[in-house]
Image: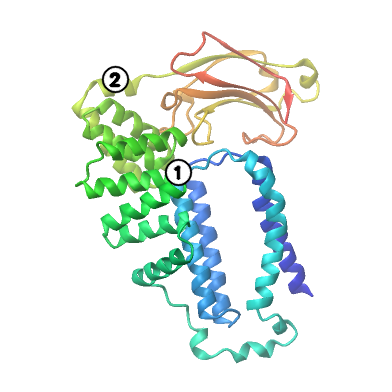
Amino acid sequence: MSFWIVAAALLVLALAILVIPLVRGSRTQATDHRQQQNIQIAREKKQLLDAQLAEAEIDQAAFDAAYLDLQTTLALELERGEVRDEGARGNWMAPIVLLAIPCASIALYLVYGEYRVIENPQLTQAATQPSQAAAPQMSLDEMVAAIEKRLRENPDDAEAWFLFGRLHLAKQEIDAAVNAFRRSDTLMPEEPGILFALADALAMQNNGSLLGEPEALVQRGLQRAPNFPNGLWLAGMAAEQRQDFSAAHRYWSLLLPMIVDDATVADEVRGLLAALEQRDPELVKAAGDKRELSLRIDIDDELRARATAETAVFVYARAMQGPPMPLAVKRLRLQDLPLTLSLGDADAMVPSMKLSSYDQVVVGARVSFSGNPAAQNGDFYTELESVDSANPPEQISLTIDRVK
């Protein structure tokens, strides 16, 4: 009985993770944090598949099929990086997910699982020695063959065509990769991850040149996902090849804050920026320009009466589209309000991610009862969107008058 209770709890947790974002229609962003989550989830699913195979809960054929689906999904998720606002779609998907996942989970377990082992543990001894060994990894050729079989059965599977292209790239079969990505783009048009992958493959086909069609594909992708890391990388490379060092510097400056957690890649981008600045000294001056916003912060009298004088107040600016981490932040106390202050590059939480890195920002002020800058239910706040940090108003007035 305890097994079923734990299983039900895990199922409810999985549904919550999946359904809540669908209902809210939240925007996920192109961040390394999200990609690491996808990788970790995939690892855990792979470990579960290994365990099921070792315990003879599924056979080798079922394992291979599930593993292939897992690889396909992970590859496309990592390539997407940033997902568009899907609120409308999430609203109708939520009930489908709520119904389909429990039904599918139970059905698959009853087909492939050995539920009788709960009452009869000795059934686990029936597994043969070979099946208890670690599951073998599929070779590239085996994965290609499996994808080919999948495409014969469903030639309109855009994700399978995408993975097919990635596999051909891994095998250095550039022409085949280009054809696969083109097919995927036809089936799933204007998907940024596919556009960037196709542009990259075309550049490889053209001795590394991104000029012409590859750059046009990159720009199409950036129109849909302006903060897609791979897109910014490719756009910078294309601009450098066109000798447009200012544009290359701008693209890579936007990219740098998104990859600070990867020291190797971040150092490479810093090296590229430094090389551009050596070529064009004016870029150093532009990079050195500091931005500041003048803010007048106050709070509604009724809300002021509901908090103590020592309650923390955070004033912040964050990118309209980009990493969720604030670009600049200051901590005050409620008793300090009303107050006029400056918020700028000097208030950056991360030196490489500053207010001057983004033209369009959101500025806000939040009364935090937890003392934590992250938003919490019950906090008092106000926000103003679409502030041009390059040409801001002389002064921005913010009055805290809302409750989260």
Question: Along the polypeptide, which appears first: circle 2 or circle 1?
Answer: 1
The image shows residue 282, relative to residue 227, as above or below, that is: above
Q: Is residue 230 left or right of residue 10?
A: left
Rendered-image quadrant of the C terminus: top right
Residue under the image location 55 percent in, 41 percent down: 28
Circle 1 packing at 10 Å, graded few (<14), some (14-19), many (20+), is few
Residue at the disc numbered 1: 189
Location of residue 136 (image quadrant): bottom left
Towards the viewer: 195 or 270:
195
Q: Which kind of residue does numbered mark 1 sit on?
A: Pro
Q: How many marks?
A: 2
The numbered mark at residue 285 is 2
Location of residue 267 (image quadrant): top left
In this orientation, does residue 275 appear?
no
SS type, badge 1: loop
Q: Are marks 2 and 1 in contact (CB under 8 Å)?
A: no
Residue under the image location 57 percent in, 26 percent down: 316
Circle 2 packing at 10 Å, graded few (<14), some (14-19), many (20+), is few
Q: Is residue 315 left or right of residue 211?
A: right
The image shows residue 118, relative to residue 367, as above or below, that is: below
Residue under the image location 53 percent in, 31 percent down: 326
SS type, badge 2: helix
Q: Which kind of residue does numbered mark 2 sit on?
A: Lys
Residue 322, percent across and down? 49, 34
Residue under the image location 30 percent in, 36 percent down: 215
